[in-house]
């Protein structure tokens, strides 16, 4: 501790340079935490989904409907406890920038199948089920737009064209971190009555009586519809979510590679600046050696400077990322529900900061320790 | 018994394939409590000799003994510890750390001791008082004159009460008035505090301040 004034004096020798170097480290670690969190959130979303739920979608692709008549046939498959269905609604609230997910669902069966992922007060659930133009909204979406129960909002349809007035009858809370709390659920029947000539379910969700039956159930369903005009592709909900995540596959790759390359480029610049700062003081190392400072002590002092900059940058960058995304409830407009800078990401960030301190401090620290006093003093003598 | 004993001391430098002898087979005794000036032209090796006594450099052959300790046989770690306890060194160009105040510069050798913060502060105040700069403790080197900077450097050399004070051209960058003040201070340290002083200089006027004057020229040391 008694050496801290010496370390601090050296750090404040060129205040602007120290501040800029620290900010570079902070920016690099902020970027690292942000990019890494996108990747971890995407990966986590692939792991979401109950093991007892399966999704049946069109084998032709996610944008193709499946016939309503499939409902009864799916319900009859051995091992299936419950069936519900949904459609991507794709409406706009006031401005296309106000993007959030909307699903047209069969209220009673949907709330039943997802009872473990979302909670909705019983009176609100009843009100939603009874009123065809009602909707329920996730808590964070309610907070974002400042809506209140009983308020009527109007969505402009894009897939299902026209204005869609909806009355908010319920606010749900997520029971799982990665279950989105910024979505809106409306009645499938409400959408269907205005689009009955062409609208059908986008996908079915099945609840199994036993998760161990998943392979047999999937095979039985796909075999059943194999030779129909609407063949199916059945998989676990996790696999369904993974199919969305794989659409982000290249984004993940870019985040992991190009993003990290940018981060490390910034870190290299910061490391170079830290090394330069230490090299400039070679003569002072000679003076300290003359006074009696040993090699190990000098090594420690130079490392302490590098460590202080790296630690300050880590606290600023990683702390800012954690606090900022938490404060603004960042979800990338609903595409990254449960977005969070995880403890693992923070630990990795701290590891990178430690690596930076070692990389930038070791060379000048070792040089300072290795130089003989006379060699070091020759820089001024 | 002399405080500093140099026996058969040689120092050679290797430059490319050429070996350059700075001096060979030098013997020297510096009595305790003496003020010795070592004179000689540029390149005569007087600073090299001073560095060997300070344990900053290693002889090619021969021994350096200071207060009974064979400095030339010590390893780097032991040498650093020994310097901290026994040597006060003053450079021609002061070599104060510009980011530290006068008091912090003087405190540097004390950081290597077990003294408490309050004790260190007391020792620093005493050392600055001895060199007449008690009122400049909070000043940074850039806020001091050359003479004042050198006095701070002398305070730094004295603060840990070293066995020997070594000075390498201490007046070399000072005007006549400041140089006279420094020499007077060194005489007082020798006279009143019985400090053993070995000073390298090429200035005959500075050498007059010392009790003994030695000459090193072309590798030969003469009285």
Image: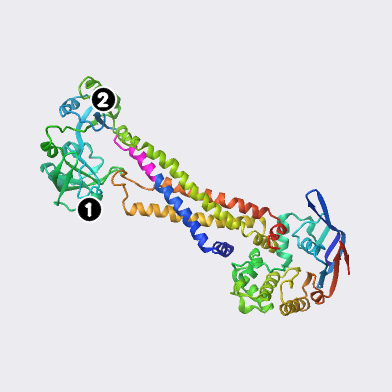
In the drawing, does residue A311 fall left or right of residue B38? Answer: left
Question: Label 1 is found on which chain of the structure?
Answer: A
What segment carries the magenta color? A37-50
What crowding class fits label 1: few (fewer than 14 Cα within 10 Å), some (14-19), or many (20 or more)?
few
Tag 1 secondary structure: helix
Toward which corner of the image does residue B192 lie, by quadrant?
A: bottom right
Looking at the image, residue B102 lies above or below residue A144: below
Q: Considering the image in quadrants, where does the N terminus of chain B appear? A: bottom right
Q: Main secondary structure of the magenta part?
A: helix
Question: Label 2 is found on which chain of the structure?
Answer: A
Residue B68 is at least partly visible in this image:
no
Mark nearer the N terminus (2 vs 1): 1
Tag 2 secondary structure: helix
Please name the residue that numbered disc 1 is placed on: A145
- Residue B179 falls inside the magenta stretch: no
Question: How is colour applied across the structure in the image?
Answer: rainbow
Tell me how far mark 2 sits from mark 1, CA to CA: 42 Å
Q: Which mark is residue A217?
A: 2
């Amino acid at each position: 501790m008694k050496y801290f004034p010496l370390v601090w004096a050296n750090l404040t020798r060129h205040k602007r340079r120290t501040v800029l170097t620290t900010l570079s480290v902070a920016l690099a670690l902020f970027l690292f935490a942000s990019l890494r969190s996108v990747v971890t959130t995407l990966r986590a979303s692939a792991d979401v989904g109950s093991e007892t739920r399966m999704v049946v979608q069109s084998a032709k692709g996610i944008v193709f409907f499946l016939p309503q008549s499939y409902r009864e046939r799916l319900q009859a498959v051995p091992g299936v406890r419950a069936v519900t269905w949904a459609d991507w609604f794709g409406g706009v609230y006031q401005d296309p920038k106000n993007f959030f997910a909307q699903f047209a669902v069969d209220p009673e069966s949907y709330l039943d199948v997802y009872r473990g992922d979302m909670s909705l007060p019983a009176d609100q659930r009843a009100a939603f089920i009874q009123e065809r133009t009602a909707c329920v909204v996730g808590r964070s979406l309610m907070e974002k737009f400042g809506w209140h129960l009983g308020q009527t909002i109007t969505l402009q349809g894009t897939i299902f064209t026209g204005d869609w007035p909806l009355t908010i009858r319920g606010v749900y809370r997520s029971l799982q971190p990665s279950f989105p709390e910024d979505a809106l659920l409306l009645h499938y029947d409400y959408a269907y009555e205005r689009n009955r000539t062409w609208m059908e379910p986008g996908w079915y969700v099945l609840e199994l009586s036993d998760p161990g039956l998943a392979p047999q159930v999937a095979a039985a369903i796909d075999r059943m519809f194999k030779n129909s005009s609407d063949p199916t592709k059945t998989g676990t909900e996790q696999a369904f979510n993974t199919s969305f995540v794989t659409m982000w596959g290249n984004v993940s790759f870019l985040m992991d590679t190009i993003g990290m390359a940018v981060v490390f480029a910034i870190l290299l610049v910061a490391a170079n600046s830290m090394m330069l700062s230490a090299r400039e003081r070679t003569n002072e190392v000679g003076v300290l050696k003359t006074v009696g400072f040993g090699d190990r002590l000098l090594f420690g002092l130079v490392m302490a400077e590098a460590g202080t900059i790296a630690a300050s940058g880590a606290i600023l960058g990683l702390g800012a990322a954690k606090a900022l995304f938490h404060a603004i409830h960042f979800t990338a407009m609903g595409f990254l529900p449960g977005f969070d800078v995880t403890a693992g990401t923070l630990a990795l960030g701290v590891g990178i900061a430690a690596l930076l301190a070692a990389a930038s401090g070791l060379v000048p620290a070792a040089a300072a320790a290795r130089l003989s006093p006379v060699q070091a003093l020759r820089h001024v003598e | 018994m002399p405080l500093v004993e140099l026996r058969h001391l040689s120092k050679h430098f290797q430059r490319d394939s050429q070996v350059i002898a700075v001096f060979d087979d030098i013997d020297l005794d510096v009595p305790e409590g003496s003020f010795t000036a070592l004179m000689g032209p540029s390149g005569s090796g007087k600073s090299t000799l001073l560095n060997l006594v300070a344990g900053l450099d290693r002889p090619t052959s021969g021994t350096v003994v200071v207060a009974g300790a064979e400095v030339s046989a010590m390893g780097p770690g032991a040498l650093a510890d020994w310097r901290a306890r026994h040597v006060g060194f003053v450079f021609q160009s002061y070599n104060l750390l510009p980011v530290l105040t006068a008091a912090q510069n003087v405190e540097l050798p004390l950081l290597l001791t077990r003294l408490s913060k309050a004790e260190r502060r007391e020792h620093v105040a005493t050392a600055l008082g001895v060199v007449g700069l008690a009122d400049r403790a909070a000043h940074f080197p850039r806020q001091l004159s050359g003479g004042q900077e050198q006095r701070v450097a002398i305070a730094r050399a004295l603060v840990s009460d070293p066995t020997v004070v070594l000075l390498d051209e201490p007046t070399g960058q000072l005007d006549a008035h400041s140089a006279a003040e420094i020499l007077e201070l060194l005489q007082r340290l020798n006279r009143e505090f019985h400090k053993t002083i070995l000073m390298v200089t090429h200035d005959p006027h500075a050498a007059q301040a010392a009790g003994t004057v030695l000459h090193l020229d072309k590798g030969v040391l003469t009285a």
